[in-house]
Image: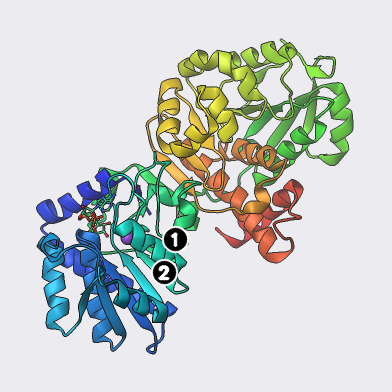
Amino acid sequence: MFIVTAKEMYDIDHYTMHEAGLDGKILMENAGRAISGRMEKFMDKSNKITVFAGAGNNGGDGFVIARTLYNRSYDVQVFQVVPDQKITGDAHYHKLLYLNYGGRVFSSDDHGHLVSRLDETDVIVDAMVGIGISGKLRAPISDIAERINQSDATVIAVDVPSGLPADEGISNFQSVQADYTYMVGAAKMTAFLESTSPYYGGWEKVDIGFPASSFPMCSSRELWGEEQYRETMPEREKYAHKGKHGKGLIIGGSSKMPGSIAMAAKASLKAGTGLLTVASSETVIRMIASHCVEAMYQPVPESDGYLTDDPDLSVSDYDAVAIGVGMGRSNRSAAAFRHAVQDTNGPLIVDADGFYHVKPLLDQLAQREHPTVLTPHPGEMAELMDVSIPEVLKNPFRLSAEFAEKYNVYVILKGRHTLITAPDGRQAVNDTGNPGLAKGGSGDVLTGIVHAMVMQEQGIFQALCNACFVHGAAADWMVENSRACHDLMATDVIEGISMVYRAIS
Ligand SMILES: NC(=O)C1=CN([C@@H]2O[C@H](COP(=O)(O)OP(=O)(O)OC[C@H]3O[C@@H](n4cnc5c(N)ncnc54)[C@H](O)[C@@H]3O)[C@@H](O)[C@H]2O)[C@H](O)CC1
Ligand SMILES: [K+]
């Protein structure tokens, strides 16, 4: 499923109508018909349905929904939230059809009727404003949005809850709070932002007949779920040997945080790494070796509990190197970082305290011939980019893309909707995971899975998307079957990896 900005959606729309030749009225018919069909799961024939219709094509969708439901003997009334003369074009055509079928349209200026109807309404259809919104919701629609939000009825939004644009970048907004949103044709960016996604309620995309080829032409952003995982995750060959699945190195750990690297190592092995070496201080190795007996260990010198550089550590001998987990922010470790950035001869994954060390080396990352992967959460991303955390949360798509391109890195911006970005601008939002992952250790496990995935036979971008998918799906499986979000531990997520591999292939 593609994720679009308003401009991209209008480009798809334009291509469909003017290149492929599908009439806009048919698109609107398809949208309204698809939504009314799916809405029926929220309703029965005794329900009273009130549709709020605006001036644009979003309102047009509302008139199709009203006609379809009216024609199926539902008790439907439409409240038009703009004067008659504002309803033009395809929306006007569908308003007339609705009237010709016998439907009734009222003005939202008739407050008495509006209030009494809302009191008895079971289902509200919000078709006031869609992706054509500009700025904050204006009166009278802003007042009606408030009334809708106070009502006890189930609120179904058409395309987007009125008040939200498709694009990221907003902070001052007022929106209808939907229980469920049917997004038309493609998912909209604001469905994945921390501040706006809750207004969508549950959601799904409805297909209205855009040519499949128009999406990749206009957008390079998609939602990554089970379908994409199944399509891209390589199968293990029958006669594969351990060398085929990657010879990986993880560098990290400090005496204060020995667990981090142990979890990353376990996750890496569990996710499929063929041969794993853990490079850490002797103190850390002593603490963790019995917890991860499958790994090999390479002691490196330490100072005051922190790793220092070991010039004899041959990072170039490994297929992929992960560095940073549990390493701390001591400047004693800076040289170890430079060493990894300069000599790693394959994908390099940087996580956690690694960002502190990697920040002065960003220009060197840009020169690397092999992929570099950074896995920050919004706070770490803000530090890397010298912007505020609210700025990252407001514009995650744009900032990740700018950063990835500038420094030639892959970015995994972690969060409720983890966003994966490639240096060439491709982006994916991962579809799995739950609040149980908001806990120390989750990031270490993700690093381990990413480390394993980049060594399997798949494109690097797909590998990162699949790593995020497996991480979230493992957590989901555990929460569905044996844990709750409260008690889910990072080590449980490692256990869940087996279930994902067994269940989905
Ligand atoms: N190809 C498609 O994507 C299809 C989309 N459909 C639906 O059409 C809307 C987009 O339609 P558009 O006519 O471009 O704009 P809107 O209906 O969203 O809104 C325009 C309308 O809203 C008024 N307005 C703008 N800003 C504000 C504001 N801040 N406060 C109040 N009112 C505002 C403006 O004056 C206009 O009158 C898309 O979301 C889909 O639902 C098609 O039906 C099928 C094809
Ligand atoms: K809407």
| Crowd tier of the residue under label 1, counting other residues whose Cα lies within 10 Å: few below 14, some 14–19, many 20 or above | many
CA separation, marks 2 and 1? 7 Å
**Residue drawn at 43 percent across, 31 percent down:** 399
**Secondary structure under the numbered disc 2 in the rendered image:** strand
On screen, 493 above or below 171?
Answer: below
Label 2 CB-ligand 2 distance < 8 A: no
> Mark 2 near mark 1, Cβ–Cβ under 8 Å?
yes
Quarter of the image with the N terminus is bottom left
Numbered-mark total? 2
Q: Amino acid type of disc 1?
A: Gln
**Secondary structure under the numbered disc 1 in the rendered image:** loop
Q: Position of residue 19 (x, y in %)?
A: 11, 51
Residue 354 horizontal side relative to residue 385, left or right: right
Name the residue carrying label 2: 155
Residue 417 horizontal side relative to residue 247, left or right: left
Mark sitting on residue 177: 1
Residue 223 horizontal side relative to residue 292, left or right: left
Q: Amino acid type of disc 2?
A: Val
**Residue drawn at 60 percent across, 51 percent down:** 472
Considering depth in this image, is 236 or 395 the residue closer to the camera?
Answer: 395
**Residue drawn at 43 percent across, 41 percent down:** 171
Q: Where is residue 21 in the image (x, y as percent from the top left)?
A: 10, 58
User: Is residue 177 among the parts visible in the rendering?
Assistant: yes
> What's the colour scheme?
rainbow
Q: In the image, ligand 1 is in what quadrant?
A: bottom left
Quarter of the image with the C terminus is bottom right
Single out the residue that lies furthest toward the front. Answer: 112
User: Is residue 209 among the parts visible in the rendering?
Assistant: no
